[in-house]
Image (tube, grey):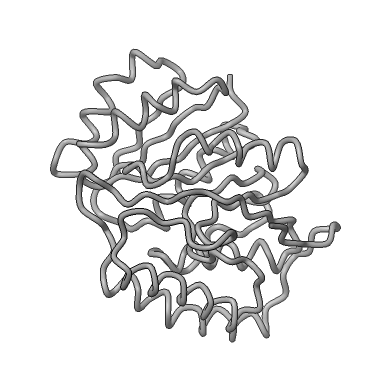
Amino acid sequence: MSDSLVIIPTYNEKENIEKIIRKIFSLPKNFHVLVIDDNSPDGTAKVVSDIQDEYNGKLFLNVREGKLGLGTAYISGFKWAIQQEYQYIFEMDADFSHNPEDLTRLYRVCADEGYDLAVGSRYINGVNVINWPMSRVLMSYYASAYVRLVTGMKIRDTTAGFKCYKREVLEAIDLDKIKFTGYAFQIEMKFTAWKMKYKIKEVSIIFTDRTQGNSKMTKGIFREAVLGVISLRLKSIFKKYKQKNKVSETDS
């Protein structure tokens, strides 16, 4: 039994999913993997199911009925991970934009250094993004600056989707009340943990844009993030957050 579960949401990731799974299982640290597939028409789920016997008891698959969104995929994964009593729960993309070898670094920040949430950050040490056009780099970088301005969070990479949570964080957050489903979901989860005084550390990573498959970014997802931040901040003024005893901080 592993103490760590990596959750990977998928939609049409047939080209990437087997390779990313095998890479994770090749790491010295023992990780388990849960793939949550939104009924991908390209057969992503079948690729996973075909290799499950090879990784019996380590590789899990949840096929949902349709494309229900990134946020709901992670929420269902979080609930399953809590039920299975994993202590460290990871978010990760399927397309190798997140380097699997960085999973161990995020794990150590929580397991050895005592942080509650480790964030794989593209912007804590400059801009560490490969293969993005400059327009997208600027959009992402200044979107994070906008989120910091509105929310007051000190986190440099507010939309980052490569993270390690201690189980207690996800147990404390009312997951059924998390509203957003796209990139705003990533902001909302960090903001909630920050407001609850959990200790957060950003870990510098190099983000490499996908080389296979298609990006899931749309104008609607971006719009949700921009407008959602204002809604999130306004609601937080009147909302009481359950506080953790320790004082929150963001270290570089």
Residue at the (57%, 23%) spot, across then down: 29
Which residue is more in the foreground, 135 or 244? 135
Residue at the (42%, 45%) spot, across then down: 98
- Left or right of 32, for residue 12: left
Residue at the (52%, 49%) spot, across then down: 205
Q: Which quadrant holds residue 245?
A: bottom right
From this view, report whether residue 227 is shown above or below residue 38. Answer: below
Residue 111 appears at what percent x and percent y?
71, 36
Residue 48 appears at what percent x and percent y?
28, 28
From this view, report whether residue 21 is shown above or below residue 146. Answer: above
Residue 66 appears at what percent x and percent y?
23, 51
From this view, report whether residue 118 is shown above or below residue 221. Answer: above
- Left or right of 157, for residue 21: left
Q: How many marks?
A: 0
From this view, report whether residue 225 is shown above or below residue 68. Answer: below
- Left or right of 210, for residue 57: right
Which residue is more in the foreground, 170 or 95? 95
Which residue is more in the foreground, 45 or 19? 19
Quadrant occupied by the N terminus: top right
Residue at the (65%, 35%) spot, across then down: 87
Name the residue furthest left: 42
